Amino acid sequence: MKPRALALAALFFLVPWAAFAHVGSPDVFYEGPAGPYPVDITIHMPPVVPGQAQILARMKNSDPVKVSFLPIYSTTAVKNAPPADPGQLVGGETNLYSGQLWLMTFGAYDIEVRIDGKAGPGSIQIPVNSVATSQLPLPPYLEKLLLFLGALLGIGGLGVVEASIREATLPPGAVPTARDRRRGLVACGIAAVIILFLLAGGNWWWDAEAMNFRRHLLNGGWPDMAANVQVRGSQRILHLTIGGKAFAPDYSLPLLLDHGKLLHFFLVREPGRDVFAHIHPVRTGGKTFDVALPSLPEGRYEGFCDMTFAQGLSTTGTMAVQLPAMPAPQSTAAAMVPDPDDSWAAGPAATAPTAPNADTVYQLPDGQRVAWKAHAALRVKQDAALRFQVRDAAGHPAALEPYMGMISHVAVLRDDGAVFAHLHPTGNYSMAAQMYFMQKMSSETGATKGDGMAGMAGMPGMMDMNHPGPPDALISIPYEFPSAGSYRIWVQFKTGGKIWTAVFDADVAA
C-alpha cells in the first residue's frame, strides 16, 4: 500500500472517534431538491455507536410518493451497502415521512434519501459523521439482575463440575466414596479459581474498553489546534497548526475544498462576543496555515475552524488566541494578501422588539436593515425560525450577491462556547463531503453524479452569476437549536461588492 493510502487509512480509522462537523450540534439539516422533489430533511444522530439515526423527510406538497433511506459508509463499496429502508408516512400527516437507520461504526456516512413519485425518481446525498457523544449508563435494576444471573450461572457451573468429577465414572446405583467426594471438591476448587481468573480478566478488559471509549468520547472540537500571531511589518499573521499532537510531524492533512476554501476559520472576541471574523487561512506546510488578520481589535479570541478531510469526514477544531494591538502602518508592501472573502464586524446585537410577533431589526452602517422575521418562542429541537430579510436604505429588498456560492453564511454560538455551528440556506452539512459522496456514487455505479449534484446550482440559497438571489431578499436557514441557553447569531451576506454581518441574540428554552 502506498504511503499516502496508509496515511488516509490511519486518518480514517483514528479520527472518527473524535470528529464531528460542529461543536455540540450533532443533528443534520437539509433543505432543497431531491431530483424533482423539494424536501426538508432532518437527521437526528444517535449519541452512541452503534446507534439508530432518526430521519424525517417533509415533502413540500402532499402528492403521494415512496421514500426510502440508504446508509453508505465512506470506505465500503456502494454495491455492498445494505438495502434501502422504506420511510413510513407519519400518522396524521400527509407529507411527512420517517425512518430509522443503524449506523454500525465510527466514521463518515452518506445517507441517501430516495423519493419516487409521479415525477419519476429523485435522490439526494446527505453526509453525516457517526460518532459517540455520550456514554449510556447501565440501569441499576439491570445491573442487579445481571449480577444475580452471573452468580447463579457460576454457582451452577461449580455444582456441575463437582458432580461430574465425583460421579461421572461410577456405575449406575453406586454410592460415591470419600475419595470420590474429595476429587469432586478439588475439581470444584480448581474450577472456582479458573472462574475467578476469567472474571478478573473480563473485568480488566471491560475497564480498558470503557476507559478507551471515554478517552475518545466527543467532548468539544477536534483536532487539536494551536495558534500564534506574528507581526510582519504592518500586518498581524495568524499562524495555525492543526493536529500537532494527533499526527506525525511530516504528515500532510488531506483536505477537501469547501466553498472553494480548505479552511473556514471563525474568531469571536471574549467575553463580550462583540467582535466576529470569518477568515480563510492558506496552507504553508503539511499541517500549518497562515492568514493575514483584518483590523480586529486586540483581545482574547475563541477560534472555530471548519474543515473536511478526504473520504468525507468533516470536523470543527477549537482553540483560543490572544491578538495584540494593530501595528503602526508602514510603507512596505503587504507580506500576505488577504483572501477577498475574509470579513469581520464589531458591535452589539440587535435588541429584541418589545411588541409581540414583531421583527427584530439590525441596522447596518450604510442604512441597510436586516430583519429577523417574527417567530414564536424558540425551543430546543424545534424549527429555529432563522428567516431573515435584507432591505436597502430606501426600504426595498436588497440585491444579494454570491458570497462563496451562497446567498448567506450564518454562524451560531452559545454563550458558554459549548455549541457552535456554521450554517447555510441548504443546511449545516459539509458540501465538500456531499460532493465526495456524489462522486463516489458516480464512479462506483456508473450513474450520473446524483440528482443533487445536477441540481445543486438551483438549490435554495446557492448563487452564481447565472442564479441571482431571491427577489424578496429573504434568507431561510434550516436549523434546530440542540440545547437550551443564550445564543448569538451572525448573519453574513454580500451586497454592493461588500460583505456585511448582522448580529442577533436568541434565548432558547428547553
Image: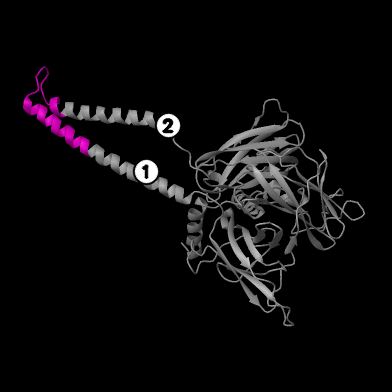
Name the residue rendered at 73%, 51% in the picture.
456
Q: Amino acid at mark 1?
A: Trp
- In the picture shown, does residue 332 fall above or below 257? below
Sooner in the amino-acid sequence: mark 2 or mark 1: 2
Query: Is residue 425 visible to us here?
Result: no
| Residue 78 shown in magenta | no
Residue furthest to the bottom? 331
Q: Is residue 220 left or right of residue 157?
A: right
Q: Quadrant of residue 266?
A: bottom right
| Residue 187 shown in magenta | yes
Q: Main secondary structure of the magenta part?
A: helix
Q: Is residue 369 left or right of residue 431?
A: right
What residue is pinned by disc 1?
206
Position in image of residue 252 (x %, y %): 54, 66
Of residue 454 and residue 218, the one placed in the foreground of this image is 218
Name the residue rendered at 56%, 52% in the picture.
220
What residue span does the magenta drawing correspond to?
165-193
Q: Quadrant of residue 363?
A: bottom right
Foreground mark, 2 or 1?
2
Numbered disc 2: secondary structure: helix
Name the residue rendered at 70%, 77% in the picture.
234
What residue is pinned by disc 2?
140
Q: CA distance from mark 2 to mark 1?
A: 18 Å
Position in image of residue 222 (x %, y %): 55, 56
